[in-house]
Image (tube, rainbow, N blue to C red):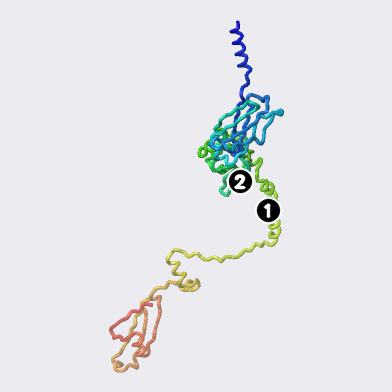
Amino acid sequence: MPTRLLLLLFLSGHVFSKEPPDVDCWVIHLKHINCSWNKQGTPNVNYTFNSWFVMFQSDKKNCTTYVSENNTNTGCIQPYDQLLDRRFRTFQTRLSHGNETFVKTHQLKQKVLLYAPINLTVKNGSDYNLWFYWNQTASHCVASEVRFRVNDKSWETSLVSIGTQNYCINLPSSSSRYELQVKSRVGKDCGESLNWSSWSEPAVWGSNNSTDTNVSAWTPLLYVVAAVILILFVMMFLPNERLRIIPIPVVPKPSLLLYDIEDWLQFSKGMKGNLNYNEQACPVREYCHVSESDSSSSDGSTCSVTTDQTDCSVSIAVNNADDLSTSAGPLSSQEEEQVFV
């Protein structure tokens, strides 16, 4: 019986014993450390919080900013200088209340939680591509992930390399709507974080909601002004227009026939008509009668030229032998010369 009582007291004491608070710490945006101890619920007492890095115990700090719930301390925000490098060191926390003290060791290398990227903007570049830009702390250590969708369809995700704070969508369609968001974390080169930041505010570009509001507001007005100017120019210049007909001289096309070209080059039309004739050639014989008494003298000699054709009658009287010899050349009494005209 006494043994049972002792066992019951031991078990009841173990059940009702106070469990130490579990402290969980995160490096927030590489600026401060946020520690909380309310995982098991809100504690019954207000604990005092202290923290330090093992290699820098002399730099022990008390909590300057407590996080409370129902007037009970549940967490502490502790700023630290050079936290980007010191987070690789071992970190220790201590909760104390009265005679109770709870010390815990933390490894903060992978427990960095960044804020969401800010200043997310979109621009239609000169290369006809859609460019998204954003800002994030310690960009040389930060990797990013983007998600975008077209016309409110399903999201498509893509990783962005460390140090890059822009993303490009090639040749977007002006009739579509593009929406993009970004989240970040510390990359592998600087000690990869376990958790991503929350998604940034979306940047929207496209037919339904363009971020370039100046262009979308002024474009219809520019079209109207251009149309009015065009109408004015037409009204100004239309009455002054004249239709001018300039006569073009017709150049005759020469024929390719050889005889036509020769006729066109050498003779005019009138001359060609006058020279177009056909006549028959008549043989002409010249007879000279020389008497014996007159052979010594040339004064009484006569010559006559006749033809032996009935359709040609040409007679030429030769009174002077010198003239005959000049015109016809020397002739003997027995020679006959035929002349064709």
Does residue 67 lie above or below 243 as drawn? Answer: above
Q: Nearer the viewer, residue 253 or 338?
A: 253
Is residue 212 at all visible to an observer of this figure? Answer: yes
Residue 123 badge = 2
Q: Is residue 233 left or right of residue 296?
A: right
Does residue 218 lie above or below 4 as drawn? Answer: below
Task: Give the residue type that dot 2 points to.
Answer: Lys
Q: Percent from the top left, x then y, of residue 163?
A: 54, 43
Q: Classify mark 1: helix, strand or loop.
A: helix
Q: Is residue 240 left or right of residue 164?
A: right
Q: CA distance from mark 2 to mark 1?
A: 26 Å
Task: Give the residue type that dot 1 points to.
Answer: Ala
Q: Classify mark 2: helix, strand or loop.
A: strand
Q: Is residue 222 left or right of residue 248?
A: right
Q: Which residue is mark 1?
A: 226
Q: Quadrant of the C terminus?
A: bottom left
Q: Percent from the top left, x then y, of residue 288?
A: 33, 86
Q: Percent from the top left, x then y, of residue 55?
A: 54, 37
